[in-house]
Every structure is written in C-alpha cells, then in structure tokens.
Image (cartoon, coloured by chain):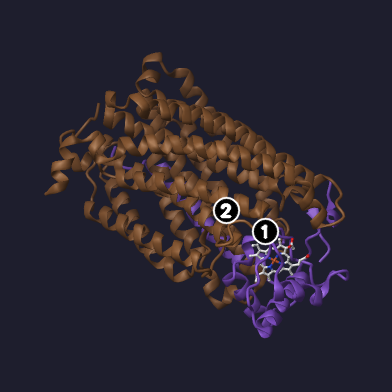
Amino acid sequence: MKGPQPWRRFLFLALFVSFFFYSASVYTSGTALNEGPVASDAALRGQTLFRENNCWACHQIYGLGGYMGPDLTNVINNPDLGPEYARMFIEVGTDRMPDFQLSDSEIDDLIAYLEYVGAAGNYNPKKGKVTWYGTVEYER
Amino acid sequence: MVQSNTNDSTCRRSGVNFVILGLMSLGGCVLMGLLGAVKYLYPEALSNFEFHQLRPIHVSLAVSWIFLAAIGGIYHYLPNYRNLTLTWPKSMHIHFWIFVVTGLAILGAYLMGNFGGREYWAYPPALSIPIFATWIMFGINICLTMKKEKEPWPVYYWMWMTGIIFFFITFSEAHLYLIPFFNENIIRETTIQWKSYGALVGSWNMLVYGTAMFVMERISGDKQMAHTNQAFLLYILAFIALMIGWSHHVYAVPSAPWVRMLGYIISMAELAILAKIIWEWRQSLTPNQKHAHLISYRFIFASDIWVFLNLILAILISIPAFNLFSHGTHITVAHAMGTTIGINTMILMGSVFLIVEELCGDRFAGWHRSWANQGFWISNISLVVFLGALMVAGSMEAFIEWEDFYERAEAIVPMLLTFSISGVGLIAGLWMIVVAAISMLMPAANEPEAIQAGAE
C-alpha cells in the first residue's frame, strides 16, 4: 500500500477538524467577556506598550510571564499599592528595573492597562478556593 | 552503512548546515542564559545589557536550536535513509539563508530594544514574515517528498507532518493580536497568546518525537517499531496534548472554566508512552547495535531518564490546585528547562550524533569522541543540580508564606546562586558536545571530496 493508511488518515482529519472547532470556541465563547469590563482605548494602548517594551520579560499578568519582577495583575486595585505607587516605578525604574524614558501619557496608558487586568481578574494564589476535585475557583 | 546515493556528496550533506547552525544556536543560547542569570542576581553587572534583552535572545536561540536540529535531521534523513529525493532541493538552500538573515535581524532588534510580540517571539512582528515564508516552503517540500513514499507511512512521517502543519497554525495564532477582534478583548488576547505557546511546544514535540522514533529505528534496524499501534498511540496522545494541553498555562486567566478543565483532564499520558517505547527499545537492542552508535544511543537513553523525572513534575503541575501555587515560581522554570534540555536536547543530540556516526564512521575518534563523551556526563550531572536548585527555589516561593515579593526574592538567592554555578557546568558540558559535533560535521571532516565540490 502506498502512502498513509486510510484509517490513520481518517483519525488525523478528525483530530484536525476538532482542533478547529475547539479553537473557534476558545476564540469566541471561551473568552467572551460576559459581565466582565470592556477595555478603554487607553488600556489597549497600554497593552501595546507593555509588549513593545517587553515588560513581559520580567513581569507576569495572571501569573504568566517572566519572574524577575512581581506579578502586576492587581498592583492597581491593591489598596496598599495603587496607581501612584505603580507610576513611581515606571517613571524612574529601580536598580533592577530599567527606566524606559516613557512620556506621561504613555505611563497613563500603561496604568490604564494594569487597572483593566486587575478589574477583569485576580491573581492571588493564596485567595483561590480549591475544590474537592482539584480545580480552583477565583473571585472576580 | 548509508543505503542510497552514497556517492552523491550533496545528498550526504543534505540538512547538515541546519544542524550546524542549530548547534551554534545552542552554544549561544546557554551563554545568554548564563549572562541572564548574572544580570538577574547582580543587576549592576554587564551594564551594556538589560535582562529584558538577554532573556528573549536566550529563549529565541533555544527555540531555533530545537527547530534547526529537527529540520536538519528531516532534510537529511529522507534522502539518505528513506530513498526519497527531496522534491524541491533548491528551496532547502533558500530556506537556510533566509533563516540566517532573519535570525541576525531578530538579534539586532533585541539588542536595540525593539520588541513587539512576547515570550518566544518577542521581536517586532514584521520579522515573522520571512519565517512564515520559509516554513511554508519547508512544509511543501517535505510533505511532497514524503508523499512519494511507496510503503505505509512510519509513525515519524505522521509526526513530522503534524508538527509542520501545527507550527504554522500556532505561529499564526501567536500573531492574532495584530487583528483588532482579538486585541481589543484583553482576556481573549492573553488566553490565545498562551494557547499558541502551548501548542507551539506541542508542535516541536511532534518534530522531536518523530526524530526520536527515526533514530531508534535506525539504531536497532527494527523496521516494525515505527508501525506498531503503540507508536501510533503516542502520536495520537501527542496530538491531543498539542490541541488542549496548553490550558494548564492559563488556570489563572479569567476565561471560561471549561477551557481550564479540559487541560486538567488531559494529563501527560504522552510522556508515559514515550518513556515506555524508549524503554522497550533499549531492552531489545543487542550489544553490537548499541556499540555501532554508542554516543547517539547514550543521548536517547539519557532522554528516557529525563522523561521519567519530568513526567512526575508535569503531572503535578497539571493538577490545578498544585498549579495555583507553583505557577509563577521557579518550579515552572524547572519544568520548562527540564523538558527542553533533558528531553528535547538529549533526543536531538541523539539525532546529531547519529548523523555524525554514520557520516564519519571510524573518523569520529580521538578528542572529538572523548569531548562528546565527557560533555555528555558533565551536562547530565550538572543538569541534576541545576534543576534541583530551581525546584527548591520554586517550592520556597510556592509554599512558604512571605511578607511580600521582596522578602521572597531575597530568600531564594542562595538557590539561584547554586543554579548559576551548576549552570556553568551545564554550559561547559554542552559546549564540549557542540564543539565535538560541529568539528565532525564541517565538510572537511566528513567529506574530503566535498572540499573540491564546494570550490567549483
């Protein structure tokens, strides 16, 4: 027999097609905002700045990213930290975090982005509720 | 030893340039890793570089090592050992040179602080265009070549084809943020980015597992092992893991719960089957078969041990309740480095040295051979300490109640120092292997007649 065997061909196609359906539902209902907040233009500009300056290399959002600096998900809505605290770091940097020479309006955008991710979700491992079957429930 | 086209030196060298470039990427990757670690621990050192430049260089070079070694192997194996001439041989050279130029441009962008994407693709997205173009050329070339196969497809053809198709898909997915529909919903954008990175790892695993199956078939001479149902089951599991295994990356992203549940349900059965196949293959080898490809054999064997160790960790971090604590700590780094170095790099070195041992035969001796040998032991032993230190650091971060990030970061410094010191051993070992392999793969070493051919 020449080439791939028919039933293996079929299995491949079945998985391939289900990947598309699966991805399509992740792209739509799996990540629909439902009652979650909608991002402002400033937050979207901040999202781009966060990528362009590679803040990701050192920081995490929702626990994803680099580990040199802290997770930034809740830096704005944490009453002990907040926007002015975050602004200070972004404006001048520290000995471990570079100063990116950003303008005031760029910093405003970054703060708006960080505010959004904190409003849309939480990342505080110690606050999640572990269910009996091993998953974790968060408060929004 | 070579079945066909033995006299055709262009065929014998098919894909070898990719392997050499891949080995160079690995050498650079581990060096950048060390510089990154120094910068992490002593921010005032290396004042010309920033950590956020070194990290993407390190990661991108790691990815290019894996892909180049796998691609080079495929370009090499099909014409040399499967009797299939490449459908489009010219495109292989174009592929190579476009890759070299794009790679240099990406390095330049990082050094100038020009970023755009993130994680594996942190460079400005325009530089992805040549990567897309060459990948399509590579995919068409290889799939049309495999289509000429007269016998039923061995499982590694399936794996290579799937890896090629899915790299294209996940690489496209990683760029969806350029479309407003995705970018305007920050939760969607974040989820899909991490989905694509998980599937990317799945697609390179396909290429690497396929390579492992090929190397094992070649060493043992057992033509059946790549046709068994067990081998095909490994393929199916790797396929499903590629589709949904990424969701363990996004437990904390506020997307719909079922997205995360599915990732939990698919555990790491794929690794278990891979371990089982390698184990059974080892048992089936005669001393003669092992001896004929001793260095290649050793690397595959080492990968098996690492599969077992990583399996335990992978299953643990797939449990959401554990993942919740381990995520965002150095346990995740141990998982990433344990699999890329322990499993992928060891398997790919098995492939590199299969090529070396078959191309060079008895000429692979003297210092070349002893460096490969010593490098093997030095890198594997260092890797044990290296990963151990990361695991301890990560567990401290995860399971001790710290006042804040700063106290926690301070506490793990001794572990990160241990990590960096063993990292020096790891680099020394890997460099010995890389130098030994490159010295044997250069045209002069394995093909005296190629010097004349190349001079024309």
- In the picture, the disc for residue B399 is none
In the displayed structure, B162 sits above or below A71; it is above
Q: What residue sits 79% from the left and 76% below the top?
A: A83
Q: Is any atom of residue B250 visible in this view? A: yes
Name the residue at the top extreme.
B287
Q: Which chain is brown?
A: B
The secondary element bearing badge 1 is classed as: strand
Res. B80 image quadrant: top left
Q: Is any atom of residue B352 visible in this view? A: no
* Residue B245 falls left or right of residue B437: right
Marks 2 and 1 belong to one chain: no
- Residue nearest the observer in this picture, B109 or B141: B109
* Residue A99 falls left or right of residue B277: right
- Residue nearest the observer in this picture, B445 or B242: B445
Amino acid beneath label 2? Gly
Q: What residue sits 23% from the left and 30% below the top?
A: B3
Residue B81: x and y, percent? 27, 34
In the displayed structure, A31 sits above or below B331; it is below
Q: Which chain is purple?
A: A
- Residue nearest the observer in this picture, B231 or B55: B55
Amino acid beneath label 1? Leu
In which quadrant of the rendered image does the N terminus of chain B lie? top left
The secondary element bearing badge 2 is classed as: helix
Residue B14: x and y, percent? 26, 44
Q: What residue sits 44% from the left and 35% below the top?
A: B432
- In the picture, the disc for residue B198 is 2
Nearer to us of marks 2 and 1 is 1
- In the picture, the disc for residue A64 is 1
Res. A66 image quadrant: bottom right
In the displayed structure, A35 sits above or below B253; it is below
Question: Callout 2 environment at 10 Å: few (<14), some (14 to 19), or many (20+)?
Answer: many
